[in-house]
Image (cartoon, rainbow, N blue to C red):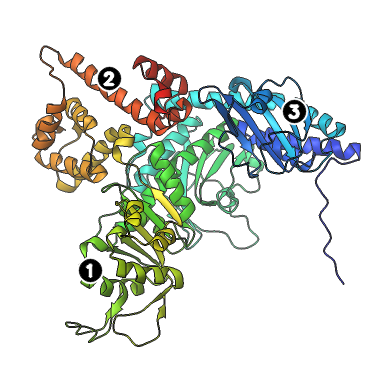
């Protein structure tokens, strides 16, 4: 009988030469990493492969939140304990005080389930301070003297690599600030545009600036044909030939060039001696160095950013890392623009545009990305006007079903007596007035997606029928005696109602609630990312000025201050309507307070303190200071008093954020 050979357990090789090779391989891998997190993951891999550890993590103390920050981990399951990472635990405090590697049998409080041996070693992260590497094993007797010696040698050899990575990260942050602010380069707000070609042109400008290049192009993948598509606005330099609209692969046996290698492998490509590179096919004249990185989405390459130089050895690993950072930061914006391109040709639509740049929205769109390429049911939760239908389009567009229909049904807009027929269809004669067979929306959405808006407005009888569809994938037309028909439909639901409260009152079925909440996505209200209002106002002005043929180009400081003080109960929809009305009513090329809706202005002016005797400058400072304090309080509340997390939400350096908190005499502890 054939037996499948058992895999050799991980552990330190007995042969000294093999140990040296393993150490060399780990060091080689570490030096390729451009950031601290990458080097730390190499160390954890060494802990698994060389020391036989089952679990591992790198931690750093965070006194402000009174707990450990996990900088890297192997992905093992941590113990479910509320204070597991608390600095008040003796086991945790001990880890931060280590001066040398320490092995402990039967640790009283391990991080991972079933751990019987713990090995901890101090780490220096250069400018980022000290940290601790922790390895744990469920095997008694793990981490002997040889393993400890190997780990210490690995840490010693990677010390300069970690310091270099930390320094490079710091320099990249400084350079990004220098490029985007001090030199007046494009900021993220400038990139918040709907048109794909315009966006790609702006991204290319940033790519060229960040790598000191004069030649560059961005090519987008045509996912149907596998070709690379050019954009007239996303090419700059002395071309070696007229750029075609599309690049096609060469016939089998002939290299198709670096850009197709990047497309296929979803990896960057750097060559400082391009003349001798067999993969290179010239795009620009006189090129000696080439750097290209993928625009990556859902683990596949959707586009390639290319920069080239006339100088040899023009690009470094830091240049590559900077370009990869840019690519990561613009991916969401590229997908938004592609969504707009894909939907503006649909009947009855002018294109789906998602606006706003903030940590809150970035997290929402990350969840959309992860959920989109599955068939899981998604429910979008949030206040009215937060953009739930836009996200439904984004989920469908980013899924494998995007070539099939997305059917939109607003259940709140259809009377109960007609809604069942709308969703599931009916046969002729099923009820009075049923003079023809009707195909239901679920049947129309077969092999595609259906968006059920305001799902909380469904009555209990219809909730039962919807539950049947979710459980069995079958629908039954009203009045039909035929067997129920199977449909392949991805359900995306949305509601602004409190389903939990409705469930407690018996108004919403518990089983349907859990069927819908496979992937819940909460949309933040606009007041939680108020700092995006100026950029959204700018984008809406440009959109509506073009649509209505108006010469409006900007908003006055006074009008913007009023908008920043408004809570926007109608969220983005309300802001959009306010700006559209103001663009139409504006008497000049700048929207003033007099152009805003009168009720809004009167309401906000009543709330504002009297400003008699104050000049414009002092009044402006007062308004902005009040906005700043309210905003800080909002993000501290969301972060539950955690300074680091609040600073991340605000997009502000932690030290600067703490200074603002102290200036406004806010106590972070009061928000916990």
Q: Quadrant of the N terminus?
A: bottom right
Number of marks present in the image shown:
3
Residue closest to the eye, 202 or 368: 368
Q: Quadrant of the C terminus?
A: top left
Which element is circle 3 on?
helix
> x and y percent of residue 27 in the render?
74, 34
Single out the residue that lies furthest toward the right. Answer: 15
Marked residue nearer the N-terminal end (3 or 2): 3
Q: Quadrant of residue 542?
A: top left
Single out the residue that lies furthest toward the front. Answer: 505
Instruction: Residue at 48%, 27% (x, y): give it.
Output: 644
Disc 3: which residue: 155
| On screen, residue 558 above or below 444 | above
Q: Label 2: few (<14), some or many (≥20) within 10 Å?
A: few
Q: Is residue 312 visible?
A: no
> x and y percent of residue 469 in the render?
40, 71
> x and y percent of residue 113 in the render?
68, 43
Disc 1: which residue: 416
Q: Is residue 307 left or right of residue 455?
A: right
Marked residue nearer the N-terminal end (1 or 3): 3
Instruction: Residue at 38%, 38% (x, y): give it.
Output: 202
Label 1 vs label 2, nearer the camera: 1
**Distance in Å between CA atoms under marks 1 and 2:** 50 Å
Q: Is residue 397 left or right of residue 556?
A: right
Which element is circle 2 on?
helix
Which element is circle 1 on?
helix
Marked residue nearer the N-terminal end (1 or 2): 1
**Distance in Å between CA atoms under marks 3 and 2:** 48 Å
Disc 2: which residue: 625
**Distance in Å between CA atoms under marks 1 and 3:** 67 Å
Q: Label 3: few (<14), some or many (≥20) within 10 Å?
A: many
């Amino acid at each position: 009988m054939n037996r499948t050979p058992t895999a050799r357990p991980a552990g330190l090789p007995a042969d000294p030469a093999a140990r040296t090779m393993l150490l060399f391989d780990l060091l080689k891998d570490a030096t390729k990493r451009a950031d601290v997190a990458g080097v730390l993951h190499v160390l954890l891999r060494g802990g698994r492969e060389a020391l036989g550890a089952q679990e591992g993590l790198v931690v750093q103390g965070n006194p402000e939140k009174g707990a450990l920050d996990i900088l890297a981990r192997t992905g093992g399951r941590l113990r479910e304990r509320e204070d597991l990472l608390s600095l008040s635990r003796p086991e945790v405090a001990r880890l931060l005080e280590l001066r040398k590697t320490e092995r402990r049998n039967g640790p009283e409080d391990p991080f991972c389930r079933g751990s019987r041996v713990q090995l901890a070693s101090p780490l220096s992260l250069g400018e980022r301070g000290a940290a601790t590497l922790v390895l744990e094993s469920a095997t008694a007797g793990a981490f002997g003297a040889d393993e400890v010696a190997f780990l210490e040698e690995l840490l010693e050899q990677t010390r300069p690599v970690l310091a270099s990575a930390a320094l490079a990260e710091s320099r990249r942050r400084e350079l990004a600030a220098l490029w985007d602010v001090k030199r007046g380069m494009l900021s993220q707000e400038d990139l918040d545009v709907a048109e794909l070609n315009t966006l790609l042109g702006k991204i290319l400008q940033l790519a060229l600036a960040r790598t000191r290049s004069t030649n560059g192009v961005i090519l987008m993948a045509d996912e149907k044909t596998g070709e690379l598509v050019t954009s007239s606005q996303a090419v700059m330099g002395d071309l070696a030939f007229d750029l075609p609209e599309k690049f096609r692969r060469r016939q089998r046996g002939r290299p198709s060039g670096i850009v197709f290698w990047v497309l296929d492998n979803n990896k960057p490509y750097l060559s400082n001696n391009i003349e001798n590179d067999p993969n290179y096919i010239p795009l620009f004249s006189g090129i000696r160095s080439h750097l290209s990185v993928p625009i990556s989405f859902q683990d596949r390459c959707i586009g390639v950013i290319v920069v080239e130089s006339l100088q040899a050895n023009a690009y470094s690993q830091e240049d590559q890392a900077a370009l990869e950072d840019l690519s990561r930061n613009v991916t969401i914006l590229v997908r938004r623009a592609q969504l707009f391109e894909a939907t503006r040709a649909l009947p009855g639509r002018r294109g789906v545009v998602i606006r706003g740049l903030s940590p809150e929205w970035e997290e929402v769109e990350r969840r959309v990305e992860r959920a989109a390429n599955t068939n899981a049911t998604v429910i979008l939760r949030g206040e009215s006007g937060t953009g739930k239908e836009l996200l439904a389009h984004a989920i469908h567009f980013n899924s494998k079903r995007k070539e099939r229909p997305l059917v939109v049904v607003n259940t709140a807009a259809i009377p109960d007596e007609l809604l069942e027929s709308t969703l599931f269809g009916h046969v002729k004669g099923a009820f009075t007035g049923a003079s023809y067979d009707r195909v239901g929306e679920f049947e129309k959405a077969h092999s595609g997606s259906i968006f059920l808006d305001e799902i909380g407005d469904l009555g209990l009888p219809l909730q039962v029928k919807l539950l049947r569809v979710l459980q069995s994938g079958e629908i039954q037309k009203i009045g039909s005696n035929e067997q129920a028909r199977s449909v392949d439909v991805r359900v995306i639901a949305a509601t602004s109602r409190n389903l939990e409260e409705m469930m407690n009152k018996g108004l919403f079925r518990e089983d349907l609630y859990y069927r819908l909440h496979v992937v819940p996505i909460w949309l933040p209200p606009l007041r939680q990312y108020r700092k995006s209002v100026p950029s959204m106002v700018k984008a809406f002005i440009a959109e509506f000025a073009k649509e209505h043929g108006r010469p409006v180009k900007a908003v006055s400081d006074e009008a913007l201050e009023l908008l920043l003080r408004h809570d926007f109960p109608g969220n983005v929809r309300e802001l959009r309507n306010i700006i559209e009305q103001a663009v139409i009513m504006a008497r000049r090329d700048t929207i003033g307070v007099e152009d805003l809706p009168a009720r809004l202005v009167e309401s906000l002016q009543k709330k504002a303190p009297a400003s008699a005797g104050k000049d414009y400058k002092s009044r402006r400072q007062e308004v902005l200071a009040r906005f700043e304090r309210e905003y800080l309080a909002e993000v501290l509340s969301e972060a539950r008093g955690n300074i680091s997390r609040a600073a991340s939400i605000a997009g502000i350096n932690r030290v600067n954020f703490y200074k603002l908190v102290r200036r406004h005499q806010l106590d972070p502890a009061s928000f916990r």
